[in-house]
Image (cartoon, rainbow, N blue to C red):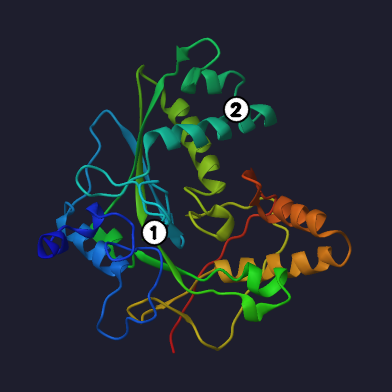
Amino acid sequence: MIATAKNVPLMFRAQVEGRCQLQRIDPRRRGYEKQDVQIWTEEWIDKAEEHPPAFGSEVQSHSYQITWRFINNGGQDDGIIRPVIGARGIPFYPGSSMKGIFRRAAQQLEQSGEIEAGSCDRLCGNPATFSPGNLRFHGGYPTSNQWTEGLVDIIHPQKSWQVQESNTRQKSGGAFAQISLYKPELNFGISSTTPLLETEWDTIWKIWETALSFGLGCRVAAGYGQVVPRQLSNMLFRCRIKGQGPASKCLDGSLEFRPNIFRAALRGHALRIFGGLSSDRNAESLVDTLFGGIQKNEGKWGLLAMQFNERSLDL
């Protein structure tokens, strides 16, 4: 019975100790002994289709490069964030998610007068009158099988260690894992139920690129899901950083530039400054207003966006 259970792929096992534990990195496993999340990932990509699906001729599509990592929570396992996975084993960005961020971008462009009033309801539909829109959103897929590289994403929560607790000896910490795509190129498809002029398609892709500029998927406040190129018309500050020191490493020992550590550093400094000027609650609320965050299950969209471009990790 035990031998039979061991033959079941980790993807179909319960997230409990002894069966499959994806999120927590076990420090007792060293050297050649693989973590559960590594075995889970290898079993997944081994059975996935080699080539992502292609859109039909009636679908307009554009491809965009992600600057670092892209994560879209499938919500299928307790305690672990992993992508939405299609029937062929290919991760994808759902069309329903596309429509949601497209509608939000269209509403903002309407309010600013950059697109014609009523465009959002015409393209996406009007929920109040139950009238459908002209567009159909077919989701986004990786353009090649390179999405299989660097899937295991190691995270080290540091907020409570650095700025929220005075007695650090009583705290426990460690490394946790999630599954995210590393620098994928994603191809997004949109079609229309009625013929559209080329100028109308130009407007549609302008709206979609505006939506992408806010960040794609989840954890965008930590630097995930940023698209190249990104036009920052309201840039406040720009700089270059050059230095030496230890680099972040993956479980296989390879180096990885993680821009979220710079954002976390700025967020920590802001919390220290506001904490010296106001109460704890007000300080955390102000930091969430600037950088985004979740307090008491209520999320805030941060006013400040950050973009990082990696140049080199050569030793």
Q: Using residue 52 as the reference point, say whether residue 73 is left or right of it.
A: right
Residue 115, quarter of the rendered image: top right
Q: Using residue 146 as the reference point, say whether residue 49 is left or right of it.
A: left
- Could you tell me which secondary element the residue under label 1 belongs to? loop
Q: Is residue 125 above or below residue 20?
A: above
The residue at 64%/68% (across/down) is: 159
- Quarter of the image where the N terminus is located: bottom left
The numbered mark, 1 or 2, whose residue comes first in the sequence reads 2
Q: Say which of 303 and 273 sits in front.
A: 273
Residue, disc 1? 180
- Could you tell me which secondary element the residue under label 2 belongs to? loop
Real-space Cα separation, disc 1 to disc 2, in angstroms? 34 Å
| Residue 205, image x, y percentages | 46, 36
Q: Say which of 239 and 259 sits in front.
A: 259
| Residue 45, image x, y percentages | 21, 59
Residue 94 at least partly seen: yes
| Residue 183, image x, y percentages | 39, 61
Residue, disc 2? 115
Q: Is residue 123 above or below residue 129?
A: below
Residue 228 at least partly seen: no
